[in-house]
Amino acid sequence: MKTYASVLLRQSAPEGVDWKSMSPLARALLLARASVLPLTVVGSGQGLLYAWWKGTISDTGAGVSGPLLGLAAFIGANLAHAANNLANDWRDYHDGLDRPGYPRADYSPHPIASGAMSSRTLLLVIAILTGAAAILGGFTMVMRSEPLLGVFAVAGLVLSWGYTDPPLRLKRRGLGELSVLLVWGPLMGGGTYLAATGTIDATVLLSTLPWGAIATAVLFGKHLDKIEADSSRGVGTFVVRIGERRARAGALLLLSVGYISVAAFGLLGIFPWIVAPLAGLAALSALPAMKIVAAPRPSAPPPGYPLWPLWHVGAAFLAGRPAMGALFVGLILGTLLGI
């Protein structure tokens, strides 16, 4: 359990353990960067919880369970995220970025650069994960007979794969942050809601934006940690384009918008009212991490820090985690207590 906790929470092997000696599953999770999958667990899971709270989950005319279709969309989104992580690694390695001296190759083993697998093997793994996600997505579309599900799936695929791949290369054009806001907000949450219910409206899409903002803040943190490396290699992320100081302010703003909107939506009835006080308590617990996000990165890591040269991304992730708890617990309590 210690090994999996370290992989999932710290994106590294336990101290003193060679990652190559870990179990095949632990190595696979480490190479696929499973530590960031909670972003998708929340992004896609909120649609299911929201539908449960609103009481709008419905079976299809063919008698196929609505919860089953929602779960298929949820699993498909997480498989697609894992595939996209690996695809980004493949692309950035072949673009000459993910090599020793670049943050991605230094903080955690890279599938190719570490020697864990060949480029061809990595492509095969990506194809298997993508195929499994496509099968689940296709199943929900066929069972729901809802073309809009296909629109959500294709839009998510284009934005995710276009993040690093040509011809879009959204990350290099300063549009990667916007794509994350859309994918981890309306497309994921709205997609699972649509799969579970067969319907969607503007309020549902609006309800997904707080988490979209927080997920985007995490990406701001990641790009802050790579700002010098990206700038020197001509990778024009939005963070590179606006500069380090403004990017830190932007990440803090996105986190603040996430918390404030979760609380406001509770007060406005978009979420159960109990979400509002939970969001307030969550924001208080997130303050230490938010202060780290707002401050410049130290010149050297604290003793025992496992993710160096990453810094701001970890703080942004920790700052967003209480919001995840407030939203999920609030929706569950709102459903069980009839709020």
Image: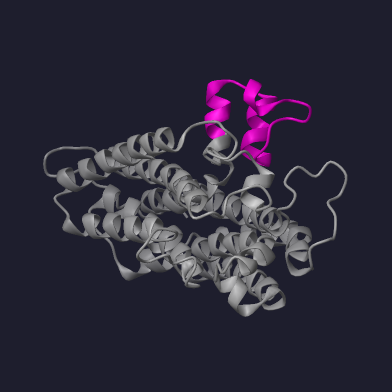
Identify the coloring.
one colour
Residue 190: tell me if it is visible. no
| Residue at 59% over, 77% down | 241
Work out whether 40 lies above or below 34.
below
Work out whether 231 lies above or below 81.
below
x%, y% of residue 79? Answer: 40, 40
x%, y% of residue 131? Answer: 29, 39
Q: In which quarter of the image is the N terminus?
A: top right
Q: Overall secondary structure of the magenta stretch?
A: helix
Magenta region? 1-29
Using residue 34 as the reference point, say whether residue 282 is left or right of it. Answer: right
| Residue at 63% over, 57% down | 320
Total marks shown come to 0
x%, y% of residue 3? Answer: 67, 26
Work out whether 8 lies above or below 50.
above
Quadrant in the rendering for residue 71 = top left
Q: Nearer the viewer, residue 81 or 21?
A: 21
Using residue 270 as the reference point, say whether residue 237 is left or right of it. Answer: right
x%, y% of residue 120? Answer: 40, 36
